[in-house]
């Protein structure tokens, strides 16, 4: 397949036609769906082409009839292409009726209307609606929808769509219908339809204005008992949005449907959210703490889209972060309020640096608002989501929490019911707070991770501290010239007792070079820079080991306290990697001693201790190596981390054992943030103790895997055993399989834990598991659990003989033929091939070239492969 033409933000033009109302009739049959769409159209007064023909996107459909103002449109008056149809010589205002058919049961791409097991569901973002009917499939065409669904009652007793149910009834031959009306105008990507047999969980909530909202959660039969966490998260999210931003829900009911086949985590369709069932289902005995937290996160995220995404949507897909980045920020704030704000922030920063920073450093680097793309599906990235959230957070840092709330209120007042741009959001924030954000907009348009270098000078005579701050940004594809960013830098100064001297002060770095002076500083301070990770930058400051240990022990800022340990770990690990050292440096003993003190400090919560004891990820270490001009040997990186873990465990063995024992009395069913943090620390202690695979500690892990009273403990124990060459591993995984083989979501953990194993035979294990009944190449969750996990396994994927690369290449081809969106995620493992040592670099390039030569490669995959190879 040929690559698609590049689409550029600079070429945006308003739609030639607008749609006031859509009447959609969907008749579901055993082998097809017939869709009748009645559209009320008018020319857009803001269109640049006053005599334009009408173009309607459409894919994989059979056109049955086409009528304009009740009259059949003849062949001379319209044209077909592989991407839609064009109607010529249309009037300025008219009605159009389109009847078409397609087969949702053969739609394995999971875009448009498709079969997910016995149910039918939709996924229309970004460009799936064109697979349902012919339509101007773009987000700036907003219309009110009335939808009628017909189907066999026995097979599809539930017929759902957006909005409010206004009519339902029976039809001949055991069929029935339901009519839904959404009072709010929306783009077609927010259209949703669900038909199937479900268990339904119902509840309700009253908004602060007294409006009673009915909550309905639809799941596969037999799974209703697994919705408790999702229901709790949804009600919490609805209350939180009222309190935090005065945003109430605006329909009579909120529906959530869980489906086993879904390309994404969930979709925020207006009033009818469709979820990957992995983001909804969970019980304490079947879901890890991570899964439960993820359910809270995703449910909150999709609900918050009701205003930041649905009521106010994107003008075009280049503005994707307008809804996604902003909503991730809102989700993070919600989770921080529901749990520990400090721990939530640390988790977000760690995830950003492990995923988005490498993306910024690779061939797919792009701005938060890209300026061009071929396939928009490829830009649902960490940059758009997580870095986009950091952009919103920086605005809050600049204007304050109350200022951000004012900005949100003005944004909603101005743009409710509109499709808008990132500038519209920034202007609302600027106007509400009387601040100039014009330079700040570079965060939307400029790719790459800025580097901030700081030098400090203390003048004891004048009692002043001067900071000399410089910024730069690495070159990224198609951006050879970088402008200085507006960077909010949060700073604290600690005296010799560890007490804050100035609190936290935010300065704005706007030029390549800035000088900031602080007066009345009575002694030379220890600097606490970039507090709360106030900007997504790479900070360079010549901290001494003693200063970092001081910050670890005393800083009031949780981020910098954690960051101090991370910097020390990274320093020692990079030295070990560079020298191929088999032992940790002597200086690491001081860090170990500081961590011992932290472990023993009863004032510090367990979740923070777990973060502080965790090493930098392999991805972060790889970036740090490249920053030093060194290439990545993934096996050397893994070996250094393994050596560090074993050394730390040996020194802290008594304290780790004591901490684990003290935490072993937790209520296994408690899922509050404190209990989750304690379990995290307990299992980290066990992981360190068993790192050397001695029989005693492996035995403890085996016992926990067999008799652990919740999934968090069992999965942690299996993770420990997965790396070991021990019969205990085989027995533990076999027992787990026997117990959970009927639960696909839990079996995903079983697949993933084995694919992550750091053993030489892991590739053979993964190949064998592809033939296991728990694996399904057509299901994105199964592919991600097994193949996606293996593609990030430094031992298996990066085998020196290239067999891991060849395996993933052939698997990508197979998956691409079924579901391009699922396949393209696997290619990301090759994206930074240039950063690896010469032998692996050549093998990875060969694998990408092999994919590039594959004639039937999808447009999704071809774009990423081409950009990875540097061909466009």
Image (spheres, grey):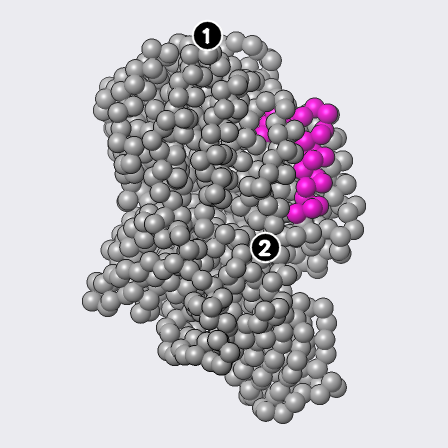
Residue in the image at 67% along x and 87% along y? 73
Return the x and y of residue 263 as percentages of the image width and height: 54, 52
Which image quadrant for residue 762? Answer: top right
Which residue matches tag 2?
Answer: 377
Q: Considering the numbered disc 1 on the image, is that residue within a helix, a strand or a loop?
A: loop
Which residue range is magenta in the image? 792-815
Q: Residues within 10 Å of mark 1 (few under 14, many from 20)?
A: few
Residue 870 pos. (x, y %):
71, 43
Q: Nearer the viewer, residue 63 or 510?
A: 63
**Left/right of residue 105 with respect to residue 276 in the rendered view:** right
Mark 2 lies on a secondary structure that is helix
Q: What whole-number distance in Å separates the C-alpha atoms at marks 1 and 2?
A: 49 Å
Q: Residue furthest front?
A: 173
Q: Is residue 794 magenta?
A: yes
Q: What's the residue at 43%, 79% (across, down)?
A: 170
Given contact means CB atoms under 8 Å apart, are the residues at marks 1 and 2 in contact?
no
Q: Which mark is residue 586?
A: 1
- Residue at 24% across, 67% down: 212
Quarter occupied by the N terminus: bottom right
């Amino acid at each position: 397949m040929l690559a698609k033409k590049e689409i550029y933000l600079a070429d945006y033009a308003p739609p030639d036609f607008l749609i006031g109302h859509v009447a959609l009739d969907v008749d579901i049959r055993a082998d097809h769906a017939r869709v009748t769409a009645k559209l009320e159209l008018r020319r857009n007064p803001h269109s640049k082409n006053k005599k334009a023909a009408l173009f309607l996107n459409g894919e994989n459909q059979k056109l049955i009839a086409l009528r304009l103002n009740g009259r059949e449109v003849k062949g001379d008056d319209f044209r077909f292409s592989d991407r839609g149809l064009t109607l010529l010589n249309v009037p300025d205002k008219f009605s159009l009726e389109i009847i078409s058919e397609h087969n949702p049961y053969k739609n394995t791409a999971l875009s448009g209307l498709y079969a997910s097991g016995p149910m039918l569901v939709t996924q229309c973002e970004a460009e799936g609606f064109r697979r349902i009917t012919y339509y101007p499939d773009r987000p700036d065409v907003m219309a009110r929808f009335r939808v009628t669904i017909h189907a066999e009652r026995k097979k599809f007793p539930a017929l759902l769509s957006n909005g409010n149910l206004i009519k339902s009834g029976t039809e001949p031959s055991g069929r029935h219908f339901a009519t839904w009306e959404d009072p709010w105008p929306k783009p077609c990507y927010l259209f949703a339809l669900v038909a199937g047999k479900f268990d339904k969980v119902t509840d309700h909530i009253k908004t602060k204005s007294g409006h009673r909202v009915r909550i309905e959660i639809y799941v596969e039969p037999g799974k209703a008992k697994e919705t408790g966490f999702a229901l709790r998260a949804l009600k919490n999210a609805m209350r939180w949005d009222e309190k935090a931003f005065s945003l109430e829900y605006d329909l009579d009911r909120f529906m959530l449907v869980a489906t086993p086949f879904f390309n994404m985590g969930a979709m925020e369709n207006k009033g009818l959210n469709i979820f990957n069932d992995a983001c909804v289902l969970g019980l304490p005995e079947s879901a890890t703490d991570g899964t439960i937290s993820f359910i809270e996160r995703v449910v909150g995220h999709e609900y918050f889209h009701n205003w930041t995404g649905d009521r106010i949507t994107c003008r075009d897909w280049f503005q994707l972060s307008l809804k996604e980045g902003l909503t991730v920020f809102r989700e993070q704030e919600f989770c921080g309020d529901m749990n520990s704000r400090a721990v939530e922030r640390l988790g977000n920063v760690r995830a950003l640096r492990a995923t988005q920073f490498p993306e910024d450093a690779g061939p797919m680097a792009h701005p938060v608002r890209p300026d061009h793309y071929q396939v928009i599906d490829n830009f649902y990235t960490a940059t758009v989501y997580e870095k986009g959230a950091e952009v919103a957070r920086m605005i809050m840092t600049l204007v304050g929490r109350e200022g951000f709330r004012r900005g949100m209120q003005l944004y909603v007042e101005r743009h409710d019911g509109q499709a808008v741009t990132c500038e519209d959001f920034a202007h609302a924030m600027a106007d509400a707070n009387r601040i100039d954000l014009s330079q700040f907009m570079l965060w939307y348009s400029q790719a790459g991770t800025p580097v901030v270098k700081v030098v400090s000078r203390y003048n004891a005579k004048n009692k002043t501290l001067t900071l000399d701050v410089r910024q730069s940004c690495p070159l990224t594809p198609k951006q050879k010239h970088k402008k200085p960013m507006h960077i909010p830098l949060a700073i604290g100064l600690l005296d010799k007792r560890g007490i804050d001297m100035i609190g936290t002060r935010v300065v704005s770095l706007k030029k390549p070079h800035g000088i900031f002076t602080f007066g009345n500083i009575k002694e030379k301070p220890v600097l606490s820079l970039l507090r709360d990770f106030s900007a997504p930058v790479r900070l360079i400051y010549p901290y001494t080991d003693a200063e970092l240990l001081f910050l670890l022990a005393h800083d009031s800022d949780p981020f910098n306290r954690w960051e101090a340990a991370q910097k020390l770990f990274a320093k020692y690990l990079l030295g070990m990697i560079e020298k191929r050292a088999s032992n940790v440096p002597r200086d690491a003993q001081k860090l170990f001693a500081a961590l011992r003190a932290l472990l023993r400090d009863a004032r510090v919560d367990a979740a923070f201790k777990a973060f502080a004891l965790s090493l930098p990820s392999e991805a972060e270490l790889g970036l740090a190596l490249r920053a030093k001009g060194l290439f990545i040997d993934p096996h050397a990186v893994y070996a250094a981390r393994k050596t560090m873990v074993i050394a730390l465990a040996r020194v802290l063995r008594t304290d780790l054992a004591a901490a684990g024992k003290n935490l072993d009395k937790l209520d296994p069913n408690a899922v509050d943030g404190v209990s989750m943090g304690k379990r995290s620390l307990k299992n980290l202690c066990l992981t360190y103790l068993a790192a050397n695979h001695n029989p005693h500690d492996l035995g403890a892990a085996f016992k926990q895997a067999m008799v652990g009273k919740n999934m968090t403990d069992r999965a942690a124990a299996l993770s420990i055993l997965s790396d070991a060459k021990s019969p205990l591993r085989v027995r533990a995984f076999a027992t787990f399989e026997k117990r959970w083989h009927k639960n696909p979501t839990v079996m995903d953990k079983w697949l993933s834990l084995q694919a992550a194993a750091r053993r030489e035979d892991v590739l053979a294990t993964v190949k064998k598991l592809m033939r296991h009944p728990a694996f399904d190449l057509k299901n994105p969750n199964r592919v991600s659990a097994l193949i996606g996990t293996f593609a990030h396994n430094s031992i298996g994927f990066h085998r020196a003989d290239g067999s891991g690369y060849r395996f993933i290449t052939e698997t990508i081809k197979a998956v691409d033929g079924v579901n391009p969106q699922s396949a393209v995620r696997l290619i990301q493992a090759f994206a930074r091939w240039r950063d690896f040592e010469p032998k692996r670099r050549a093998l990875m390039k060969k694998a990408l070239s092999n994919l590039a030569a594959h004639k039937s490669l999808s447009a999704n995959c071809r774009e990423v492969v081409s950009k990875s190879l540097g061909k466009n």
